[in-house]
Amino acid sequence: MNAPDLLALRPLALGHDQEASACHWAQLTHRTTDYPSRRAQLALALAAGAVPATPDVAALLYRCDDCSRCRAQSSLPQLPDLARALWPLRAWLVEQGVVPEVEALRLRLLRQQHLLGDLAEAWQRLGPGVAGAPTVLVPDGAVLACDLPAARAALKAAACVCGPLALLREVPDSGRVLREVGLAAEADRFEAEARQRVADGGFRRVLAGTPKEAAALADVLRGLAVEVQYVGSALARAALEGRVRFRPAGAEARQIVLHPSAALLADPSAYSLIVEWLGAWLGNAFRPEPDPVHTAWPAAVERPAIGLPVDLARQLARRRLDQLLACHSKLILTCDPYSQRALRAVAPGEIEVVDLLVYAMQHKREPD
Amino acid sequence: MDMPSFTPGLLADLAATVGPEHVSTAVADRLANSRGVWPIELKQARGSSLPPLPAGVVWPANVQEVSAVLKLAQAAGVPVIPFGGGSGIVGGTTPVPGCLSLDTKRLDTLRVEPTSLIAYAGAGLWGIDLERSLNRDELSLGHFPQSLYSSTVGGWVATRASGTFSTLYGNIEDMVVGLEVVLADGRVLRTPASPRSATGPNLNELFLGSEGTLGVVTEAALSVHRAAEWRVLESYAFGAFDHALDALRLMLQAGLRPAVVRLYDPAETSHKFQGLDLPLGACMLVLIYEGLRELAEVSAALGRRYCERKDGHYLGSGPAERWWQTRFDTSSMVLANSRTGGICDAIEVAALWRDLPAVYTAMSAAARHHAAGVHAHVSHVYPSGGGLYVIVSVQVEDDAAAVTLYRALVDDLVAACLNAGGRLSHHHGIGLGRAHWMRAEHGEVGLGLLHALKHTLDPRDLLNPGKLIPGS
């Protein structure tokens, strides 16, 4: 396998660095290496053979995620998508043997059918689903592996909105994470399986357990006649239309803030819908962040982190927690398991971090 | 590839000084700190081999660490290149063999003295972070260079920077009321913040525009403002560039101070304001007034008189709003520089009102002589004159030819400027790119004085060697 052609990155690599201060990694480390432009330059130098493939270079090229903060700040009309451009380079780095953590993930995938481990028990607890249902729930393997209550809340919320739901044990997610970590062949296989199963099942709607999976599945299932949506978005729409009701927040004295995952923030209409729903439901208890597209940091790498020092990961979560607490909130709602775990690890005892769907289902009002 | 020339002993000493995690000889860090955005550096970065790299990078966290690092470098005879945001466009941070890149970005402290409205800002603080922090207290520095999102306070001071609102708020030298600077031998100079003094030559001025050749700026005391409560955006079309220059001159000399002044020549007007129904050869003037509401509105009304007296046709706020929306947009330059054989750059100079028309004409002619695309605008105006940006673009067969042509083009533009009475740089600075013109700019006596200064403050020529003061 040759190093991938990354020439499309040149306008970013040779730009005027307007994205620099937008990147949370550059802000945290103070290193020029963490500018999106210089990361792109490093990628080009690596692909050209000017820089050797080493674990420290690989670690830098695994930092970038789908947070889109650089794209929001750049003045370039079509800033190259750095995160996606790095996927094939990561696959090449894995092949060069300089990313041992990914080798470990690959082994786990081989043995347990998912890179995060054996999901059989989690599937067992979710139940079999309803054969022949027009809607399928794809919970996200990360939710199944790390936050089973959130998976169950997603199932319950999806059923509130859509009625009977199918589950496909062969499709815990789209395989997007495999692509992000550089397991390209495995990602191809996962994607093909997901596409085939959804097509064969004749589903008209796919609900995803996280915003990230909703975005990934929309990519993977493009061309099929299916609607793909995050469960939280579907629930928000149903609530705003009066089809699902929640107990008022009167008894909820705490101020509440939403930590949107990067994928949710990247979809302004989905984000606005959820904010509108939470505002309508929770009233003054809900504190929407001002201008989150430009200011809200990620709380974590929303996939298995590769080569990321633990200290740096904690600093990231702390900085994000500080932003959220600046809204004077005591309850933080999350929509991905990685952010939830990272925020819980740094939050003081009086701050609760809860998955959005778990919180919603705890407060769902039963039909009169 | 440059090999690190400094010894394991020096590396160990640096690590002991700043912490091992804050010094690096990793190729990724050295590559990242190897350049600003000077077109020649960008062309080198396009190539398949590595450009010249610093031998190492160090990130001190405070003035004491900067002092200790400079003492170590001095003892070892290692050149030091101060590095802020890396947004310089004249080669001010280009490495020399075996050098240490002293990255200031961990010097990011900020405290505001609320009575006198002084912000004490660390040299490594990003401009946009400083401004956003001030905005939270309804304050503003009023300094908005196009590099706001990628340049640092220290870089502004070191390059004597200007922002687009300079006509009202001044340039960085007008905002700096005190400095903390580490000299080459590690001594720390602190000039106290003061509105003015008559205690001899202003020591701040030694370091404003010194490009890291005389010391490393670690903190600046900056005079900040209450954020503007009102803003008036206006636009005018003029039939002739000279008429618009006259209108601006009369406005400034009468005491009017718009915050933003942008006068575009016909070529840049047609490029930047595409889609507007303007007569052929029109020149667009964008004016933005801000501050107290009554003052901004009265200023705008008075300004209109001067424009109309010189046949300026009032166009309302539309074109000015377009400028506002795109004021940080450098995309056409970026895209040109990323193409094989393409280079685009803005050569900015200064001139008295008396000489501005001739400087504009001479520089435009010099650019056309090289078959370069050329357009120009005037901004940063004063009662005595203004800054002129001549934006040139060339497209040839390969990068090597582009660099050769670019060097010749810049030299011819500078020569044309100086011959017509202009000055070498308004605010981009000198770096490597224009250092060979410093003798023509300052004369033997002036350059000799700069050499003497350099020799006194940095006798071994270890601070950013080769930049600003040639042959030091």
Image (tube, coloured by chain):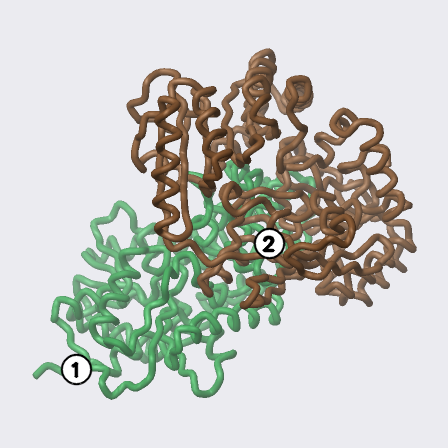
Chain colours: A green, B brown
Judge by depth and name the residue closer to the eye, B264 or A229: B264
The residue indicated by pointer 2 is A34
Label 2 sits on what residue type? Asp
Can residue A104 be seen in the rendering of this structure? Answer: yes
Please state the horizontal and vertical placement of residue B277, each as a whole percent of the image. Answer: 29, 23
Q: Locate the C terminus of chain B by quadrant.
A: top right
Circle 2 or circle 1, nearest the eye: 2
| Residue at 15%, 73% in the rendered image | A244
On the image, the x and y values in percent for residue B167 come to 51, 41
Quarter of image, res B288: top left
**Residue bearing mark 1:** A365
> In the image, what residue type sits under mark 1?
Arg
- Say above or below: B392 vs A290: above
At 14% across and 83% down in the image, what residue appears? A366
Q: Secondary structure at mark 2?
A: helix
In the rendered image, the quadrant that contains the N terminus of chain B is top right
